[in-house]
Amino acid sequence: MSGTGITIGLERDTAQEELAFLTTADQAQPALAHEADAALDPVFELRGMSVHYGAFRAVRDMDLSIERHRITALIGPSGCGKSTVLRSLNRMNDLIPGARVEGEVRYNGEDIYDPAVDAVEVRRRIGMVFQKPNPFPKSIYDNVAFGPRLNRFRGDLDDLVEASLRRAALWDEVRDKLRSNALSLSGGQQQRLCIARAIAVEPDVILMDEPCSALDPIATLRIEELMRELKENYTIVIVTHNMQQAARASDTTAFLTMGTDRAGYLVEVAPTQQLFTRPANRLTEDYITGRFG
Amino acid sequence: MTSAAPVARPSLRQASGPARRRAAFSGAMNALLAAAVLLALIPLGLILAVIVAKGLPAMNWEFLTGTFNFSRRESGGGYLHGLVGTLYMGGLAALMAIPAGIAAAVFLTEFPRHPVSGPVRFFSDVMTGVPSVFVGLFVYTLLVRRIGFGTFVGAVSLAIIMLPIVVRSSEEILKLVPGELKRASYALGARRWQTVLSVVIPTAAPGLVTGAMLAVARALGETAPLVLTALAANQVVFDLQGSGQSALPLLIFREARGAFEAGQQRAWAGALELMLLVLVLTVLARLIGARRPAGT
């Protein structure tokens, strides 16, 4: 595995260090060996991707690689198309009438918009967590078991539910009330349940669309902690409005902004620490220093 | 300490002119609305009061468990055959109309822009307003002239009454299912039918039940379609087809306009029985509708 150095660096993280992240967001990640990017193994490769909603072009000519077992953050001002980009990665845009994706979105080398590709299969491999926690109005257990049941999971469902909840760092809080309604959980717990639900179908990638924007700071911190644990097994792409969050939690950051035609485009993508300390583009610098956006 | 000229600070209790006028206007409007509500409630209250007052004296065990006497001039006997017929035909009609109606509503909400959706929605609305005697005539020409009067044809006519109500109420309920739940399901790799069956319908279930029960309650009170399809019976009938079937509204209709005091008494009791039946269904519908989804 190419990311060994990174993994060790992460496991060393303690709660105290995380709190330190919060206070010194600018220095954020301790020198994680981003320089060891030699062996690139992209999960996603976007080439000249544009997204249109009817006549409106929301995102234009995007080229971006997303590395395996990394957390990639998409940041940028409102309306720059971050969420649109995220939704194009698992064909959730298909659900929006009039949405159209042009260019290439390669997932493990395959174009996910190829007519021979089934969007449902794409979504089974590429899970998603939404801005607002959206558990089904069912029991905690049934929420986690939902995906596996769709796929006619053969095996011990109880074990899978437990494992998923453990991975989502929720097991200890819900082990005694798996049968109670998921809506009785707090917002932060609901969001971790949604992560557990996404994990239960054993995806390869988890897309997160501002997963903490409806949560309080403590719950936010827990989700970020969880993301760092999850990246051992999954690739995570997160959209966030919160620059501190991107700085704290991600390995790579992509900055998008909106052109004069109101179409979003990619300004710069770089290892997070580099992007926040030595941005290559003036627009990025203006945004991260708060001069704009 | 500063010694400034005393500033006039009007008391809060002293409302200014325009405010007083607005308050008076508001009061007058409230009184007007209250009067309108009372006016609307008067007929309802009167109907309930008269039915209870006239029906209760004739309501007894024999009425509930008996069928027609040999002579209908005499008192005694009861409407059991009508109750059985109403429940029998209502149940059959519900079995036909509710699944079809919910299926149509799912179609309308899942494919709102489909070329068929507009016409389906329009004709459901039209059907809601079709006089029920037309429904009776329709079933009479279509079925009764071929296979005769009976329970089944009666149920078909009731199902036609129920169908548009089920479609429109279910559509409204299904539209309320949050899009975020559907998206969560799709994001887990569910297909459309899986999303409908395991997320949309369970989430909407209480509301769907309420709508269906109200449609059933409405159909149980129908007389006109049954006159032309179920016709009549003097005893309890379990045959699906081949002989006429009775129903509470039919019996009420027949005896209330008859010349015999005893029959009119039974009709009042029948009206009370029908009203209670509809009341029970409506209350059940509300209870189910108010139920929280599984768990706490």
Image (cartoon, coloured by chain):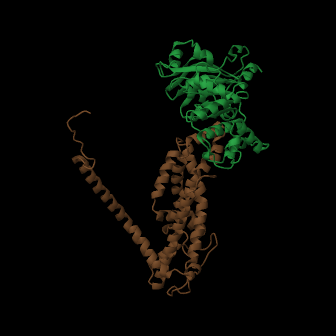
Q: Is residue B57 visible?
A: yes
Residue A242 location, x and y as percent? 55, 26
Residue furthest to the left in view is B5
Residue furthest to the front in view is B1
Query: Closest to the observer: A105 or B164?
Result: A105
Rendered residue at 52%/70% (across/down):
B276
Residue B54 location, x and y as percent? 44, 79
Q: Which of the 4 quarters of the picture holds residue B97? A: bottom right
Rendered residue at 74%/15% (across/down):
A39
Q: Is residue B28 above or below residue A158?
A: below
Query: Closest to the observer: B58 or A83?
Result: A83
Q: Is residue B198 left or right of residue A132?
A: right
Query: Closest to the observer: A58 or A223?
Result: A223
Query: Closest to the observer: A250 or B191?
Result: A250
Q: How many marks?
A: 0
Q: Is residue B147 visible?
A: no
Q: Is residue A49 above or below residue B208?
A: above
Task: Find chain B in the image and tell me its colour.
Answer: brown
Image quadrant containing the N terminus of chain A: top right
Q: Which of the 4 quarters of the picture holds residue A192? A: top right
Q: Is residue A168 above or below residue B60?
A: above
Residue furthest to the right in view is A155
Residue B228 location, x and y as percent? 51, 69
Identify by letter the chain in green.
A
Residue A224 location, x and y as percent? 64, 30
